[in-house]
Image (tube, rainbow, N blue to C red):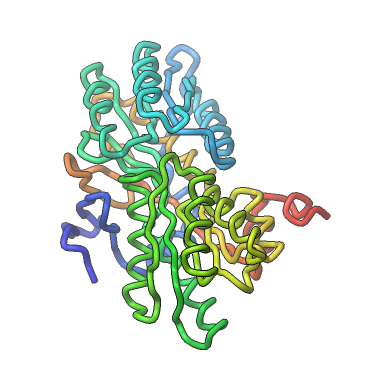
Amino acid sequence: MWSKNVRFADKVGKFSWDGTQAVKCDRRLVLCGLASLPAASFAPLVQPAGAADKIKIGFLLKTMQEERYQRDKAAFLARTAALGAEVIFDSANNDEQAQLSAFENMLSQGARVIVLQPVNTGTAGGMVTSAHKSGVKVVGYDAMLLNGPLDAMVMQDSWAVGKLQAEAMVNWLQKKYGSVKGNVVLIRGQPGDSNANTMSSGVLEVLKANPGLKLVADQSHEGWSPDKAMATAENLLTKFGNGIDAVICNNSGMARGVIAALDAQGLASADKVFVAGSDADLVNIQFVAQGKEAAEIWKKITPLAERAAEAAVMLATNPDKDPRTLLKFDRVINNGAVDVPTIVTPVVLVDKANLDATIIAESFYTRQQVYGK
């Protein structure tokens, strides 16, 4: 069922984004097509800049709290350096005011383009407006900010993340009970975050299609906090007498918090309670290998960071040109203020059965890291 907020305009896939409804397009593209596309198909044609025209690019993440962000940073810095640009890097510890200060500092240091992963997707538009007054473009990263004149966006398909998690849960329940039934918990990230809402909408769509599933809790967590997710899980296990069948989490850290709560009750087993996270942090992948966690979504970080670096350098070296004429984008998304050309990178469901063929085969982690041997 399509959201009433979705508006198709052309083959590019133009639609509106309200932060609460998932962006939906052809299912085959979302769940299958992206994974089969080579990384090069997303890349702008960028040539390395010479020493005489070296440019500054800001890269501002919302946090370094999760393990994955070390990879984001490393991949972005490496690709930007290969293109001959200098990076001003910072992160905000999930603090909106700290991010604003860091953003203003990047402007004062002469960044020509800032790649921004917003702490608060609902208010970050003001930073984009401020940057434009200084002639600086802004590329959104990972989470779409709302109601701001964003120049371009690089993201994973967040709706597909939630749908893949929920479909894996449906298959798990079918095998366990012979039918799709049970009590389900949805552990969201930051309240109001567009990325958290879109991942969750993918989950909710699957739940709606399976009336035997009962959503007993749908809870947001400030700062995407694993400790707060653990507390939520503890309270729910008490409330329902351990009668929770599945928990779907917006990220890996919160999934670890849930598993800690389950472990205290002797339930940290993929044979007993289905738990899915998203980010494929090493500990979570180890949990999948050990049978503590049923599934993780592997959001391929390197293509995400590299496409963002390429887009930023392209915009910085062509400041007077329309981003739509410069970038190879997959969709146009209306974020409430403007139509944003958007590059989408693939996501992959990882479980015990395909872990070796995905995470290890593609050298995201080594066998030694995952299995300890």
Residue 303's place in the image compared with 35, above or below, is above
Q: From this viewpoint, is residue 36 visible?
A: no
Quadrant in the picture for residue 15: bottom left
Q: From this viewpoint, is residue 167 visible?
A: yes
The one nearer the camera, 273 or 201, is 273
Quadrant in the picture for residue 286: bottom right
User: Residue at coordinates 34% horizontally, 17% vertically from top-left?
Assistant: 104
Q: Which quadrant, please, contains the N terminus?
A: bottom left
Provide residue 101's location: percent of width, then percent of height.
37, 18
Residue 243's place in the image compared with 252, above or below, is below
Q: Is residue 130 left or right of residue 47?
A: left
The one nearer the camera, 255 or 16, is 255
Q: Is residue 318 left or right of residue 223?
A: left
Provide residue 48's location: percent of width, then percent of height.
48, 27
User: Residue at coordinates 37% horizontally, 35% vertically from top-left?
Assistant: 119
Provide residue 370's location: percent of width, then percent of height.
73, 54
Q: Is residue 146 left or right of residue 75?
A: left
User: Residue at coordinates 51% horizontally, 78% vertically from top-left?
Assistant: 173
Q: Is residue 306 left or right of residue 27?
A: right
The one nearer the camera, 334 or 145, is 145
Q: Which quadrant, please, contains the C terminus?
A: bottom right
Provide residue 139's location: percent of width, then percent of height.
34, 34
